[in-house]
Image: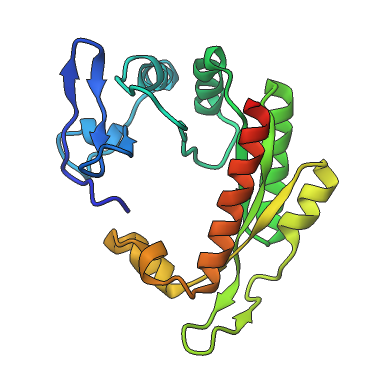
């Protein structure tokens, strides 16, 4: 998505230097993928080694002054999630953004994620429903392929904010796969308005927490 394949991580006196996406160094990344010799190499590590690396990504990376640190976590409530929460706890994380798709199976999995957040004391910033209908690139009509409303219903039951729904958009998919700037290239897409609305709600919510 960021066209950062093949970039290397370097050492400095404060630890690892993250990979910068742009010349202004406004966005920096850290991933285990940058540490592998081959991009297709599998990471077959047991829990303690994975957990130690997660802690290193928080404390041993020269992040510098940040506006936000975003941790992209896979679905689940595994040891890795616990390790991430514990590594971030000294820095008082603002909370978790939970993403689901409309189907009942996905909503059921995400319900357990919300329980995980509650048990670990992690505030839920809100729920986002992804793949919420298909936005036709020709007529802009949105068709509900996977049903609709599961994320909003889940948020209501859990008593957390519902931040919005993002439709499937072929242009968004293509932009992510090619590392293009979707926001700049497709401002009239239904996914654009959904994403900007969600981002604004997140910024307003975190600003309230910080103040």
Q: Quadrant of the C terminus?
A: top right
Q: Residue at x 77, y 48 (%)?
A: 155
Lateral position of residue 147 relative to residue 136, left or right = right
Q: Is residue 186 visible?
A: yes
- Could you tell me residue 203's position as x and y percent? 58, 42
Q: Residue at x 19, y 29 (%)?
A: 9
Picture layout, residue 195 above or below residue 93: below
Lateral position of residue 171 relative to residue 197, left or right = left
Which of the 4 quarters of the picture holds residue 164?
Answer: bottom right
Q: Residue at x 60, y 57 (%)?
A: 197
Q: Is residue 98 visible?
A: no
The number of numbered discs placed on residues in the rendered structure image is 0
Which of the 4 quarters of the picture holds residue 75?
Answer: top right
- Which residue is outermost to the front? 211
Q: Residue at x 63, y 80 (%)?
A: 143
- Could you tell me residue 6's position as x and y percent? 16, 43
Picture layout, residue 169 above or below residue 157: below
Colouring mode (rainbow / by chain / secondary structure / one colour): rainbow
- Could you tell me residue 87's position as x and y percent? 49, 16
Picture layout, residue 50 above or below residue 23: above
Closer-to-camera residue (36/158):
158
- Could you tell me residue 180's position as x and y percent? 30, 62
Which of the 4 quarters of the picture holds residue 193?
Answer: bottom right
Lateral position of residue 137 relative to residue 82, left or right = left
Lateral position of residue 14 relative to residue 176, left or right = left
């Amino acid at each position: 998505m960021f066209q950062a394949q093949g970039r290397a991580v370097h050492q400095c006196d404060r630890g690892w230097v993250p990979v910068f996406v742009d010349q202004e160094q406004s966005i920096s990344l850290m991933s285990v993928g940058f540490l592998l010799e081959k991009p297709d190499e599998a990471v077959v590590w047991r829990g303690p080694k994975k957990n130690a690396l997660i802690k290193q990504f928080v404390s041993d990376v020269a992040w510098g002054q940040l506006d936000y640190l975003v941790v992209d976590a896979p679905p689940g409530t595994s040891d890795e999630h616990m390790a991430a929460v514990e590594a971030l706890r000294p820095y008082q994380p603002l909370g978790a953004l939970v993403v689901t798709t409309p189907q009942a199976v996905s909503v059921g999995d995400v319900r357990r994620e919300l329980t995980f957040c509650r048990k670990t004391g992690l505030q839920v910033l809100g729920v986002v429903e992804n793949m919420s209908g298909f936005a036709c690139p020709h007529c802009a009509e949105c068709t509900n392929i996977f049903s609709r409303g599961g994320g909003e219903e889940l948020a209501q039951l859990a008593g957390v904010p519902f931040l919005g729904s993002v439709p499937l958009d072929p242009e968004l998919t293509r932009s992510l796969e090619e590392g293009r700037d979707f926001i700049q290239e497709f401002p009239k897409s239904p996914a654009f308005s959904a994403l900007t609305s969600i981002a604004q709600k997140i910024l307003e919510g975190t600003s309230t927490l910080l103040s």
